[in-house]
Amino acid sequence: MTPSPDARPDETDMELIRRWKAGDSRAATSLVGRHSQALARFAASAGEREEIEELVQDTFVRAFASLDSFRGESSLRTWLFTIERRLMLDRRRVERRSRETVPVEESDHVSEYGALDSIIADEAQERVRKSLDALSPTQREVFILRVQQGLSYKEIAVVVGSTEGAARVHYHNAIQTVKEFLRDE
Amino acid sequence: MNKCNELDIQEMLPDLLHGKLDADARAQVEAHVVSCGECTEDLRVLRTVKSAAVFIPEIDVDRVVRQIPPYRGILPAAQTPTRSRVVSWLVAASLIVVVLGGGSLLMIQKSPTLSPVAGVASSKSPTGALTQTGRPSDVPATLPIKSSTVSQTSAPHALALATAVDGLSDNNLRQLMDDLNNFDALPATEPGPVISVDNGDGLDQGSR
């Protein structure tokens, strides 16, 4: 491996990808450092409660293993969100199956709420979290990607495997629901 | 609160939050928000959601990078196509064998329906007389063939007879041609019962 300086702030993702393909492992470090927090935030906001770090790690492992299929038609972050979302869907599918066979115990709820108590900083944020919980999974993903990550509707459509128009509709429905929820609280 | 009709501007509010609007668009959106109660509320909600602190574990970047496999690149073009070409040829050869085998089977299945006709057509006695009806071979083939004597199922036999007309006289040939012209190949109704015509030569003895 050829040692190289860390990524410059203006260095694009595509340049870092080229460097990594050329054998520069620091480029991978730069890419992971650049996008890992956004992936973790998306996962947490989308409802993932456990093993977020593993989810982010799996996302990067899959992404780097198939970087040749990334043609740069969307941003790298959008592509990473797409991979992460698929992994989340897989997880939920597995969880749903196991929930069908294993009865949920009372202690599960207690530990979850106990953890959340320490997570949510104040009452306003707790209300926001509850309002997001009131959304459908797709609405929540679209809303988070739009509001927290600042993705365009076109990019959101790529991530959730939908159309731009559908993403707009999901966003509008989501913000109406969130507003109503916060008004009623 | 009045409902906002500026859908385009409503949709740009998240972009305003993320500083993604150019100067003109930003000025336009900000001017609208000042005068629109719904958009003001939307922007407040969006700010709350954006700044909402959710628990995000600190990601150990080095740990993640250690799990990433080294780049292996795309295999050289000379390696993969050679193998895939061999596989392609094998698949093509297999397909040909299957198609030929299937075709042969079909031919074998069809052949029993063809052979009787061919057999009748070629079943001429050394004297040229027809033996298909069981008539003695020394009987001259001068009998006229009436279409009414032939049921629908015997149509192939009539055609077979027509291929062996060497022994017929001119008159018989003419009559045969007339019969063929009057022959209704595709009857519109169910075929009627076979009517035997007694022309005295014992041709229809079996049906009596």
Image: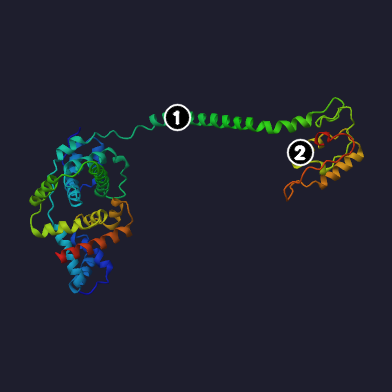
Name the residue nearer the viewer: A19 or B177.
B177
B203 vs A81, left or right, is right
Q: Nearer the viewer, residue A59 or B25?
A: A59
Res. B30 image quadrant: bottom left
Residue drawn at the location 82% of the way across and 47% of the way down = B182
The chain that hosts pointer 1 is B
Q: Residues within 10 Å of mark 1 (few under 14, many from 20)?
A: few
Q: Are marks 1 and 2 on the same chain?
A: yes
Q: Residue B53: give x, y in percent of width and height.
A: 12, 54
Q: Quadrant of residue B38?
A: bottom left
Measured Cα–Cα span from mark 1 to mark 2: 53 Å
Q: Position of residue A102 (x, y in %)?
A: 21, 41
Residue identified by numbered label 1? B87
Q: Position of residue A32 (x, y in %)?
A: 19, 43
Closer to us: B92 or B81: B92
User: Would you say B148 lies left or right of A174 here?
Assistant: right
Q: Which residue is mark 2?
A: B154
With respect to residue B1, does A8 lie above or below? Answer: above
Residue A180 is drawn in which quadrant? bottom left
Of the 4 image quadrants, the one containing the N terminus of chain A is top left
Visible residue check, residue B21: no
